[in-house]
Amino acid sequence: MGTENNKGYPKFPARPAPSSSPYASAPPPGIPPPSGGPPTGSDAVGFRPFPPSASQPIRPFTPSGPPPAPQVGAMRPAQPSPFVSQIPGSRPPPPSSNSFPSTAYGPPPPPPPPPGAAPFQRFPSPPFPTTQNPPPQGPPQTLAGHFSPPMSLRPQQQPMAPVTMGPPPQSTTSGLPGANASPSPADFNMAARPGFQQSMPPVTPSYPGVGGSQPSFPGYPSKQVSQPPPMPFQSSQGPPGPPPVSSYPPHTGGFAQRPNIVAQQNLHPSYAPPTSNVQGLVEDFNSLSLASIPGSMEPGLDHRSFPRPLDGDVEPNSFAEMYPMNCHSRYLRLTTSAIPNSQSLASRWHLPLGAVVCPLAETPEGEEVPLIDFGSTGIIRCRRCRTYVNPYVTFTDSGRKWRCNICSMLNDVPGEYFSHLDANGRRMDMDQRPELTKGSVEIIAPTEYMVRPPMPPIYFFLIDVSISATKSGMLEVVAQTIKSCLDNLPGYPRTQIGFITYDSTLHFYNMKSSLSQPQMMVVTDLDDIFLPLPDDLLVNLSESRTVVEAFLDSLPMMFQDNVNVESAFGPALRAAFMVMNQLGGKLLIFQNSLPSLGAGRLKLRGDDPRVYGTDKEYALRVAEDPFYKQMAADCTKFQIGINVYAFSDKYTDIASLGTLAKYTGGQVYYYPGFQSSVHGDKLRHELARDLTRETAWEAVMRIRCGKGIRFTSYHGNFMLRSTDLLALPAVDCDKAYAMQLSLEETLLTTQTVYFQVALLYTASCGERRIRVHTSVAPVVADLGEMYRQADTGSIVSLYARLAIEKSMSAKLDDARNAIQQKIVKALKEYRNLHAVQHRLGSRLIYPETLKFLPLYGLAIIKSTPLQGGPADASLDERCAAGFTMMALPVKKLLKLLYPNLIRVDEWLLKPSADHDDLRDVSNRLPLAAESLDSRGLYIYDDGFRLVLWFGRMLSPDIAKNLLGNDFAAELSRVTFQEQGNGMSKKLMSLVKKLRENDPSYHPMCFLVRQGEQPREGFLLLRHLIEDQMGGSSGYVDWILQLQRQIQQN
Amino acid sequence: MAWDLLLWIISFFVSLALVASVFYQVICLTDLEADYLNPFETSTRINRLVIPEFILQGSLCLLFLFTWHWVFFLVALPVTVYHAMLYNERRYLIDVTEVFRTISFEKKLRFTKLGFYIFLFIMVVFRLTLSAVYSFTEDDDLLHLF
């Protein structure tokens, strides 16, 4: 059956997914008793139990409804169609609903156990909404309130009862249009509901093909085949609709209205919030009821019900379950797990089509990527498309050949790799071969994959020692940190290290192992750089350890009294390049002021606010001097990755300096106004992380995909070496890359599309390795399905990158508008998809999967690189944030866009023995000023900063406990440290925990008291993105704006 | 008359050089697309030629102006102006870091220029033969043949 269904699948591509997702989500709840009983697998058995169950609940209805119930049991299995005729008759009066649902319910029993279970599970939740929903109808009925989800036992009928009696009007705050209040919504409702259920079974089977053995149920296939008619329907009501329709053709007419109601019920804002996840999966779309007159807010408009990602990033997992051999979503996330089958469909999908790849994402304990050595066999790859062997290749010809899943080429299996196939065509040695069972593997590459011997890990430091560097204490912190990390640098004993310092001259250090003290050589000729020594500027760390340590110890003292204010950055960079270009490696630049001497000197710019808003504005955000781009390109060519640390409180032209990091796959760390007492910890932590995290050297990455599609653009910090090859001199777990794909052929004929990310790199241990992530996604013909499989996280990630890139070539306004337009277009298309069948009125509708998209869109617009005008963020801050966001993996980006806001005072006061019990504080609050209670203490955490907000009325005890005697002082002067009491310890442990959650950056703690302007505004209020701030709109306005634009034609 | 012939001979070689240079640039770009060249190589090769091309083209244009060949001057002028604009905006070099993002535009631009230079070249060849014939025959009557 499984396969059979698979075949059917392409014909009704729309169906599978919707159900699949519910299906996926449904099972967890546990198998309710009823399902346990009936579904035994064989049809006969399946049927029997049901009628009873059906009739049981129906009894109550009988008074109102005709006697269809008994029939149901009898007839359904045999001939559904007769049924149909009956129904119309029974329909008119609301009671008829009874009969109808029962008939509709009938079908579910036949399905085999697994599907059967799913529908049942599903029930509890759907019915709930239904009852709650039909506000229009009025029969006052509070029943709804009572029968909440718990009805696991034949939930189907129970829900009905209340519904028939009259749906509760309650909860309709948002003022649903009365228009739909047809007399019998309940009845429709029910009808529709069963429909959903019923649709499920057939659907589920179609997917299981992947899952494996699934008993076939007769009768179903035929139904599926008879489906074509529903097609029109499909688009409107979505997958769930069609099946019932097709099985009971006559109903179709009757059904026509139904979607409407169903839809409208869902429109209820209260369903939008994350709390009603399950419901959302069953339904087609969610919506927000907005004022009917754009611009004017109806009192009923309840923004508290707007969707908010308070649970953080929710990864779509339906596909992980469907394709268990896919690589984990932490490595590869598609913007939609349903690839459009035609260019026309792709063009209607206005959201980006692409993926976000984080090839070296950190793995939790126990899920390490398996390492494979093919030894003398050589790496098994497709001859034509060079795809690596992966779980989706198929072996044929009794194991002598394998078919590439990407290009369908038949390849020979090398003798050493040969294995017999079992009866199912699986290789016998499948279990011993992780590359055939796991989506992510790491392969040891033989010498063919090397153009030179694998390089050792190389760390080269380029340190500014001008007056500001010594004054701020940067030099000392850096020297200490490097020294403390020497033991942990990866790649012992091959690691190499070297230093150059510079102010108006360049200082080279001879670190030869035979010396006891490093020798310093000063070069003053900045125009014609030469190296004073041919080698020994870059030395093996284990050999020269003592010299290096002596150097780091003396470094801060050496320049203690330096009063030089110049910075010969460009020449120093050239010199470093000359030292490193033999081998490559990682270059860490510590820059304290604007480069002022020699090549690459930069001017002060951006201090003229008049430039903003003109066409020249963007020029401020790109490198001023071509020197930087050229250097970046040269560095990439020689495998040098650059990380830039900038410390100045004045303008340093991060836009230019960051270019170096951008094109060499590095990152930018920015500490405006660095003071070692304040930022020391942050720098220490982040530098240590940078030095000690596992790094992949001299890497290149490529993503391959099936025929007919092609990756066309790449976004992130890297340089393209050829059209689809990303050069990444040094890459680590904190870097992600986004890419967009396009369809090359007008029509895709395959059912699935495969993606394979391959990262070829040198591990710190000196091994050349290839990390391969393989993933598969189905091809669909239905736009609705694409929306249902969309992944907000990666869409937002791509959008953020696109917007930042746009800001490099256009005005900020344009970049922001572009994002808004894209969201509007996408939602408009979605609306059009449903507008035909539903009277949508003034509601904003969106698919469940994209419920957070508008909010994240707003967050992107208000993010540091894109927000406001010149006054809102300094140019350097903007650029630094831009470079950072271009590299962030999805989860971190989402956290930065919509940070956590949690209230902690109550938790602190609660006497609990267990300090680690952080669950109580984990509920996040909406990012709006009204979430802040002046009696509370809040923590705002965006992964880069922690802001502790003390309410004005916060009990002085708490403040005293936490801050010691300084509690009344101005908080900007108070240092946050542990006091000797339980409460303070508790808070510190919480802060520590928050920091440990994401070790890639070290969030600094800021304390701020309510009303302490301007710090409060700067630190916190400005980041409460749901509020209206300056010229930017708040969440409500934003939604209204979107809605207005969506409705315009 | 000899001056005129000299003018056309110079123009002939200049426009031939222009055609060759642009043709070479187009080849480099297509090679880059086909992955026969890496971006570093491509951009050095092309960027090396850009300024000479601008100078040649500009001087040819001026030459036409000073020798009072209005038609040729006007034909050459748009490209000169465009080059001047590129130069002023400092966009005339291929950006090695972003080659792949701009490659389609750069290719189109160069194909257009190639067509234009070929057109110019043909016109020059025509005038060259004409003036060569004049100067060798020294016969003004030949003019009536055309």
Image: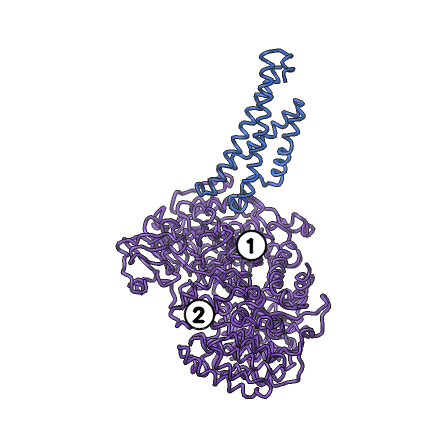
Chain colours: A purple, B blue
Residue A868: which quarter of the image? bottom right
For disc 2, the neighbor class at 10 Å (few under 14, some 14 to 19, many from 20) is many
Tags 1 and 2 in contact by the CB under 8 Å rule? no
Pinpoint residue A394: horizontal percent, then vertical percent: 35, 58
Residue drawn at 63 percent across, 38 percent down: B85
Amino acid type, callout 1: Ser
Q: Which mark, by number, is residue A344?
A: 1
Is residue B142 shown above or below B47?
above
- Secondary structure of the residue carrying tag 1 is helix
Pinpoint residue A597: horizontal percent, then vertical percent: 55, 44
- Secondary structure of the residue carrying tag 2 is helix
Q: Does any portion of residue A911 appear in the rendered image?
A: no
Is residue A830 shown above or below A578?
below
Left or right of residue A582, residue A398 in this image: left
Which of the chains bears the disc numbered 2? Answer: A
Which residue is label 2 attached to?
A: A205
Residue drawn at 55 percent across, 37 percent down: B110
Residue A874: which quarter of the image? bottom right
Q: Which mark, by number, is residue A324?
A: none
Between B138 and A93, the residue placed more toward the observer is A93
Between A772 and A1, the residue placed more toward the observer is A1
For disc 1, the neighbor class at 10 Å (few under 14, some 14 to 19, many from 20) is few
Amino acid type, callout 2: Pro
Is residue A535 shown above or below A214?
above
Q: Earlier in the sequence, mark 1 or mark 2?
A: 2
Quadrant of the image for the C terminus of chain A?
Answer: bottom right
Q: Does any portion of residue A162 appear in the rendered image?
A: yes
Pinpoint residue A942: horizontal percent, then vertical percent: 55, 66
Quadrant of the image for the N terminus of chain A?
Answer: bottom left
How many circles with numbers are drawn on the protein? 2
